[in-house]
Amino acid sequence: LVWFTRELLALPADPAEFDRIRLDGAARAARLDAAASTHEHAPTRQLAAFLATVARYQEQTRQREEVVVYLTAVGGQPFSDHITGFFRRALAVNLPGLIVLCMDTEAHNRCEAAVTNESTELILCVFAIEGHVVLIKHAFIPAILSAGVDTVWIDFDTFIFRDPTDDIVQARDNPFRVLPQRERIRYGSFLFENATEMCAVSKICDARQHWHFNISSDFDEDPASATPSDGEVEMLVTEHWDARCLNNGLFYVKATHRPLFLFVLFVRQLYVNPYTDNQNLFDSFLAHSTIDTAAPQSRPILNYALFDIERTFACA
């Protein structure tokens, strides 16, 4: 299995210039059209052509500057049997763009057959059999982000009640709380807001068993990757229904340089640490509820917020 950064769209040298692309329709369209015709990597050309079409569709139908696309993966039984139904629901709620990573030939054939005339410009079936779903899903995210397109990962076993895009944008732009909390306490590899929470969650209430934790002093944040303002959310993530650890079955990523760099680094760490649990590593990269030795000491610490799983984003 080989993945390399040349699969990304060409990136400007100045990170600030890249960050401006996601809200500049003309610049984004020019990059996508150029990549669709000249990029050296055929899957990237296919991806860029699809994203250019989706961007034009969203510019005509949505009153926002950014482009948002949804990403999922499917393969094997019984999941392939539900591809047509998943597409039918995505079209019924007017999902603004969907990329489906097909992990075997049957899934890809069924995906292609299920794309109707009305959905051909909004659904892309990608033949992606080079590895486990954990690696495939995270390998595609940097390519989409490099196009200046915000990305929402959604597990294939998710039921879409309605198009969540407006709610996602609302949660991003008006977060109840911006994380991570920089000052906390640590017990082993687990992070807690304070001793009261640690006692309630873990039933470990002896103050001698935890110590102080501070992101600024415990991690070497990349000095070249300037942290955005406190209120600017770069990711939206989901906690498990009955636990504080993150569930990476649903998350949103803003197409700016810090999340792009983080996901390139995340793919690398998954590859060189094959026995690391991807969900725990995802949590650890954000310094949410745990520490993992596979998360590099020096990395961007993103600003993120939680989806409201009690009232808006149902989670089983």
Image (cartoon, rainbow, N blue to C red):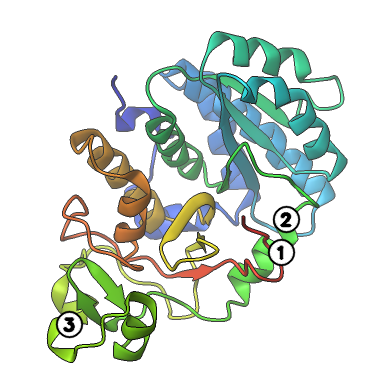
* Position in image of residue 272 (x %, y %): 18, 35
Hey, what amino acid is under mark 3? His
Residue 107, located in which quarter of the rendered image? top right
Q: Which residue is mark 2?
A: 164
Hey, what amino acid is under mark 1? Asp
Q: Which residue is mark 3?
A: 210
Residue drawn at (41%, 63%), measured in percent from left and top? Answer: 245
Q: Is residue 193 something that shows in the picture?
A: no
Residue 118, located in which quarter of the rendered image? top right
Residue drawn at (82%, 46%), measured in percent from left and top? Answer: 60
Question: Disc 1 versus disc 3: distance between alpha carbons?
Answer: 38 Å
Quadrant housing the C terminus: bottom right
The one nearer the camera, 119 or 17, is 119
Q: Vertically, is 215 above or below 301? A: below
Q: Which residue is mark 1?
A: 167
Crowdedness of circle 3 by 10 Å Cα count: few (<14), some, many (20+)?
some
Q: Mark 1 and mark 2 in contact? Answer it, CB < 8 Å.
A: yes
Q: Is 270 on the left-hand or right-hand side of 65?
A: left
* Closer to viewer: mark 2 or mark 3: 3
Residue 32, located in which quarter of the rendered image? top right
Question: Disc 1 versus disc 2: distance between alpha carbons?
Answer: 5 Å
Question: Disc 2 versus disc 3: distance between alpha carbons?
Answer: 39 Å
* Position in image of residue 292 (x %, y %): 21, 57
Hey, what amino acid is under mark 2? Pro
Tell me which numbered mark, 2 or 3, is placed earlier along the sequence.
Answer: 2
Quadrant housing the N terminus: top left
The one nearer the camera, 94 or 65, is 94
Furthest-front residue in this view: 203
